[in-house]
C-alpha cells in the first residue's frame, strides 16, 4: 500500500512538471507576436523533469510483479447472493475481517436446502463480531416430526430427541447422552424443573421471593431478558407466573436454542457482545446468568452493563445470578464497575466458589439484585 501511494505521488508530480513545462512554452509563444520559434528550456525545469522520470523508472523496476493466478489456484469469486444482499441490507463491518468464513457461509445453492454445517459457520462468524449475518435464499432443515402440542413436564425422551437434528452435534445423538456428558448444562429437563424454587444458601434467590420483593416495592415484573440463559429454565419458570422472558443463548455444539423453543419459549441467538435487540426502557427484569462472569473482557462487560441499563425501565431490576470472579477482583474491579450504574442494592451476597477451579483461583460467587432508580 505504501508503494502504491509513493508511486501515485510521483506520478502526480510528473504531471505537474509536465504542465509547468507546457505552460512555459505557451507563455513564451503568447509573449511574442512573431512566428513561434523553439525556445530553450531552462535547466532547472529539465533537471526536475529528469529527476521525476528517474524516480518513476526506479519505482517501476521495484514494483512487485502482479501474480496471475493459475487455473488450478484461482481465488474463489465473491458469491452473488452476498453481493446482492450487500445492496439490500447492511452487513456488520467485522464480517469483512473474516472473508474465508464469510465465503463458506455464503457458498450454497439458492432455493435448496442450506448446508448442514451452517450452524457452526454462523456461530463462528457471530462470535467474531459478524452479526447480523447476511441473509440467504435457502431452506433450513427442520425436524421431521414437529410437536402438535407441548407436553407437560417431565418431558418424555422421545419428544425431546425427535425435535433435534442431531447430525449438527457430533458429540451426542440424544438428550440422555447430553445429560450424562454435561450434567450441569440444563439438558436433564426432569431435574431442571426444581430450579429457582428453593433457598439453600444466601446465593439463592427463588422466584417467589423475587416477585415478593417487586410487589413490596410496587414494581411489577411483566417482561424480562435472561442473558446467557442456556436451555431457558429461568424463562420456563417465570412463564408459570405469567411473566414473559426471552432468553439469549448460543449453542456451542449443543442444542440450546432448540431446547428453549421446545419449551414454548423464545430463544435469541445473539452473543454477549451484541446489542440487545430490544427497545429502550421497556424491560422490567434482566438476569445475567452464569455466562456473565470474569472471563468476559472488562470493556465488553462495561458495554453489556450499560446496554442492560438502556433496556431496563426505571424501577426495573438487574439480577446477577452467581456471577463469579476472583475475590480481590470483586473488590477492586467488578464491584466498582457495577457501582457505576448507581442502582439500589436490594440483595448483595458473596460466597466461596468451592469447585476445583474456584479453590485454585480463590474465586467467589456474587448474587446481587439491583434496582434501577426511577429518575434514570
Image: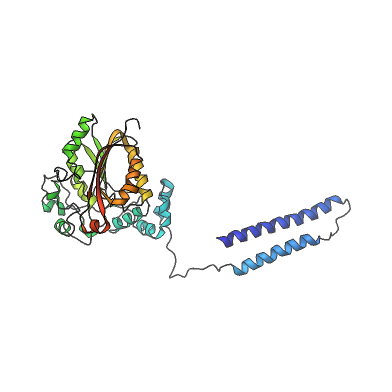
- In the image, taking residue 243 as reference, residue 151 lies left or right, namely left
Left or right, 62 with reference to 321 = right
Q: Quadrant of residue 288?
A: top left
Counting from the top left corner in percent of width and height, residue 318 is at 28, 40
Residue 70, how many percent across, how many down? 47, 70
**Which quadrant of the rendered structure holds the N terminus?**
bottom right
Q: Position of residue 241 (x, y in %)?
A: 17, 36
Residue farthest toward the right in the current orientation of the protein: 34
Q: Quadrant of residue 372?
A: top left
- Camera-side residue of 172 and 207: 207
Confirm whether residue 255 shows in the render.
yes
Q: x and y percent of residue 18 in the render?
A: 72, 57
Whether residue 276 is visible here, answered yes or no, is no
Say above or below: 326 vs 376: below
Q: Nearer the viewer, residue 345 or 290?
A: 345
Q: Is residue 8 left or right of residue 93?
A: right
Residue placed furthest toward the top: 218
Amino acid at each position: 500500500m505504501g508503494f502504491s501511494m509513493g508511486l501515485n505521488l510521483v506520478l502526480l508530480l510528473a504531471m505537474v512538471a509536465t504542465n509547468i513545462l507546457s505552460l512555459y512554452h505557451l507563455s513564451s509563444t503568447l509573449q511574442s507576436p512573431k512566428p513561434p520559434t523553439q525556445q530553450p528550456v531552462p535547466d532547472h525545469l529539465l533537471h526536475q523533469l529528469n529527476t521525476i522520470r528517474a524516480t518513476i523508472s526506479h519505482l517501476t523496476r521495484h514494483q512487485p510483479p502482479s501474480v496471475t493466478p493459475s487455473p488450478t489456484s484461482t481465488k474463489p469469486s465473491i458469491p452473488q447472493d452476498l453481493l446482492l444482499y450487500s445492496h439490500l441490507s447492511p452487513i456488520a463491518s467485522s464480517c469483512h475481517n473474516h472473508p474465508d468464513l464469510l465465503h463458506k457461509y455464503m457458498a450454497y445453492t439458492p432455493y435448496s436446502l442450506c448446508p448442514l454445517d451452517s450452524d457452526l459457520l454462523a456461530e463462528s462468524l457471530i462470535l467474531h463480531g459478524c452479526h447480523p449475518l447476511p441473509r440467504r435464499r435457502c431452506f433450513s432443515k427442520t425436524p421431521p416430526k414437529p410437536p402438535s402440542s407441548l407436553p407437560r413436564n417431565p418431558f418424555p425422551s422421545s419428544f425431546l430427541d425427535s425435535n433435534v437434528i442431531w447430525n449438527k452435534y457430533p458429540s451426542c445423538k440424544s438428550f440422555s447422552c447430553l445429560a450424562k456428558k454435561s450434567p450441569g448444562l440444563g439438558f436433564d429437563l426432569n431435574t431442571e424443573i426444581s430450579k429457582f424454587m428453593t433457598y439453600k444458601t444466601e446465593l439463592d434467590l427463588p422466584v417467589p421471593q423475587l416477585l415478593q420483593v417487586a410487589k413490596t416495592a410496587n414494581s411489577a415484573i411483566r417482561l424480562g431478558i435472561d442473558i446467557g440463559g442456556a436451555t431457558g429454565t429461568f424463562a420456563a419458570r417465570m412463564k408459570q407466573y405469567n411473566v414473559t422472558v426471552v432468553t439469549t443463548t448460543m449453542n456451542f455444539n449443543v442444542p440450546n436454542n432448540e431446547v428453549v423453543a421446545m419449551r414454548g419459549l423464545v430463544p435469541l441467538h445473539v452473543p454477549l457482545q451484541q446489542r440487545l435487540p430490544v427497545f429502550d426502557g421497556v424491560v422490567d427484569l434482566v438476569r445475567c446468568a452464569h455466562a456473565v462472569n470474569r472471563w468476559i473482557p472488562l470493556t465488553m462487560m462495561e458495554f453489556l452493563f450499560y446496554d442492560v441499563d438502556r433496556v431496563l425501565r426505571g424501577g426495573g431490576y438487574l439480577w446477577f445470578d452467581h456471577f463469579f470472579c476472583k475475590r480481590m477482583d470483586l473488590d477492586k474491579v467488578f464491584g466498582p464497575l457495577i457501582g457505576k450504574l448507581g442502582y439500589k442494592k436490594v440483595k448483595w451476597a458473596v460466597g466461596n466458589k468451592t469447585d476445583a477451579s474456584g479453590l485454585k483461583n480463590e474465586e467467589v460467587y456474587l448474587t446481587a439484585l439491583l434496582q434501577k432508580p426511577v429518575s434514570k
